[in-house]
Image (spheres, rainbow, N blue to C red):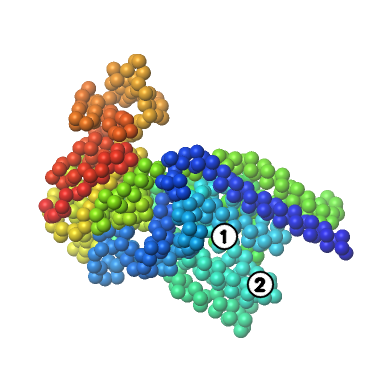
Amino acid sequence: MRLAKSKIWIIRGIKGVLLLAVIAVGLSWRFDDLKVWKARQNLYFVTPDRPIFASYDAFYFARLARDWQEGRYRSQKVDPYRGVPDSHLKAQDKKEKGFQPHYPFPVPLMSWSAAELSSWLKIPLEKLALYYTPITAVLFVIPLFFYLEFLGYTAAGLLGGLVGVTSYIYLIRTSIARFDTDSLNLFFPIFLGMCLFFYFQSRRPLLWVALASFSGFLSYWWYGHPHLVFVPYGLFVFVLWWEKRRFGRREWLALALLFLPNAWFLWRAPWSLIHQLYGYVIQIASPERKGLFEGYPNVQQSISELQHFKGLLQVSGFTLQNPFLFLLGLLGAAVLLIKEWRGLLFLWPYFFIGLLVFRSGNRFGMYLSPFLGMGLGFWVDWLSQGLFSWLNIHLSESLRTLLVLWVVLILGYGTLHFQRISQKFVATPKANAFLARDMEKLDRLLPSGAWIWSWWDYGYAFHYYARRPTFIDGGGLQLTPKTYYVALSWTSSSQEEAYRITNFLASEGLIGLYRRLVLDNQTAAELTREILQGQVISRSPKHPVYWVFTQDLPPKYGWIGYFGSWDFTQDKGRYGFVFNLNPCRETSKSELLCARGVKIDLREHRVFWGARILPLAALVVQGSSGVRREVFRAKGFILEIASSAYGRLLFLTDPPSFRSNFNQMYVLRRYDPRYFKLILDDFPFMVVYQVNSLKAK
């Protein structure tokens, strides 16, 4: 008897060691980036203890944490940093109030916990974020293992965790300094599903349903998507009805424990589910925006990962990187979910979310990855149970388990070999130190009431570093017509038109657009034409507006130019082209050898780009004495040489993009003093213009 017990404890110990090994792999593959960050501290850190965040959304959650620390956070009140001028206008009805971003209620769990930990540990938020996400990202392997271990699938639990923590897409989205909600978006669904399952298995069912209720509360507090809690709760009701048919006192008490504490957010779940399905499956395919602001370009077109169905090789590339193992795991996951449908029913919704990766965003692959590992492990568990019986080989349960664990060890090692691309990934910050310091400089340079007119990607970063509001940012505001008008102002070759656009949007915002388009029954094309022609008389905004160009924008000008040149009759635009050639070196043959294999022959005035030979029409040199232009031929590309405090920089552009306000004001720093005033020239990192005292023109 003692010998049998000792064997059990030895096997449990081995399982525990393997579980810890999975956690250790997940942590080490994330924290090995630290040596690169420390080697590049001058670029990746604002100060020695303040690394720069590795995701755009991180600046948003960090800003909320900072607002909480400083006592500025006002739950359900209008957020003054986002979506100006609408956040500063008086809304007249419920629809108009919907255009005003609000502080979330409650403060996001990640922001609140980080703020409190930062204050308690007396370290900057940025330093805390360096470790926060990787540590929380590996926690899901614990409930996943115990869930599947209880069902008798040890290998599925271990390999599910291993593939999950090492998948390329999950590693990217949970790297150091990422500070994003993805880090617990696997933990909560799995833990919630486990709790709901154990209600039907435990002698203390009400304890497990109480844990499921608390888990649902934390899940919503963490991620703010009520349908991700509502769906497994609905499945719980279905299973409860299926087994009992008639509810007794215990069943009604269980439902009360589950739903009543979370009723404050569950009532919105059906609409939230419909909205998500429409946005990620249907709306992304449309070139133009539908609904309230119909006719404007659909900015989701610029998110390339959303625009096409993905093939097997592409999906396996960022989940389980061997196509054969990917198929084997996918098939095994499907068989396991069907075979154990009663036990794993609460994980089905997240498996379907994972399958969205074939149609929608790459990030859904993080939900699919653990199921692929579970599928591989299922075959190991299934074969260990059936193969020996078929061969008429009788093994003790302990010996069979040891063989399973040995196979898991071998298969896990092989999986890590195939996932080596993930291990090679190194997270990088979303801005460099020069740009981050320039943003902080804006906090001192701009008046307290200033608004920033820039592209949406760095909207959250401006809120965090510069502590100034922006017109557009992430989180849905980039999908509004505001983004079109920012693009139009930059794509236009007329600074007077740009002035009128800025005046209109700074005065009226989305609320004004809504009143003109919906209440006054104007079309998007009609209103835009009137704005450009100066026929729209807007009130003068009370806040000064500043145009801010940043280093990341030239590669994004393709889509900026596309949206800014939008043709309302053809529902399409023209892609712009402002290509950063740096670094370049000149040869003795008067040739420029530049980045990405581009070669420019200055004698023959030709551009060699891969297999293409393109004509060079002109050379434009910007310096302290002004702009000098040398024309070679009527048609072709234009080579720009722009001066800066860091040396000269070269850009290649096409004629329409060359004439754009973006190129003229950012690269060449040419502006009309009637409308703009240059106040900061730290090209290429940041160029800032004050829009002259706005008034209707």
Looking at the rendering, which quadrant does residue 438 occupy? top left
Residue that appears at 48% across and 58% down: 122
Nearest the viewer among 425 and 186 is 425
Residue that appears at 19% across and 47% down: 498
Q: How many marks?
A: 2
- Say whether disc 1 or disc 2 marks the residue closer to the N-terminus: 1
Q: Which mark is residue 372?
A: none
Residue on which disc 2 sits: 200
Vertical position of residue 647 compared to residue 679: above or below: above
Give neighbour class at mark 2: few <14, some 14-19, many 20+ (Cα, 10 Å). some
Vertical position of residue 402 compared to residue 663: above or below: below
Q: In the rendering, at what x and y percent does residue 523 appear?
A: 21, 56
Which amino acid does the dot numbered 2 rest on?
Answer: Phe
Residue 53 relative to residue 84: left or right: right
Residue furthest bottom in the image: 249
Q: In the rendering, at what x and y percent does residue 4 appear?
A: 85, 61
Q: In the rendering, at what x and y percent does residue 223 appear?
A: 47, 62
Vertical position of residue 402 compared to residue 266: above or below: above
The residue tagged with tag 1: helix, strand or loop?
helix
Residue that appears at 33% across and 63% down: 79
Residue furthest front in the image: 122
Q: Which mark is residue 187?
A: 1
Q: Where's the N terminus, which quadrant?
A: bottom right
Residue that appears at 33% across and 52% down: 466
Residue 412 relative to residue 454: left or right: right
| One can see residue 234 in this view | yes
* Marks 1 and 2, how far apart at CA: 21 Å
Vertical position of residue 351 compared to residue 562: above or below: below
Give neighbour class at mark 1: few <14, some 14-19, many 20+ (Cα, 10 Å). many
Q: In the rendering, at what x and y percent does residue 388 appear?
A: 81, 52
Which amino acid does the dot numbered 1 rest on?
Answer: Phe
Nearest the viewer among 361 and 649 is 649
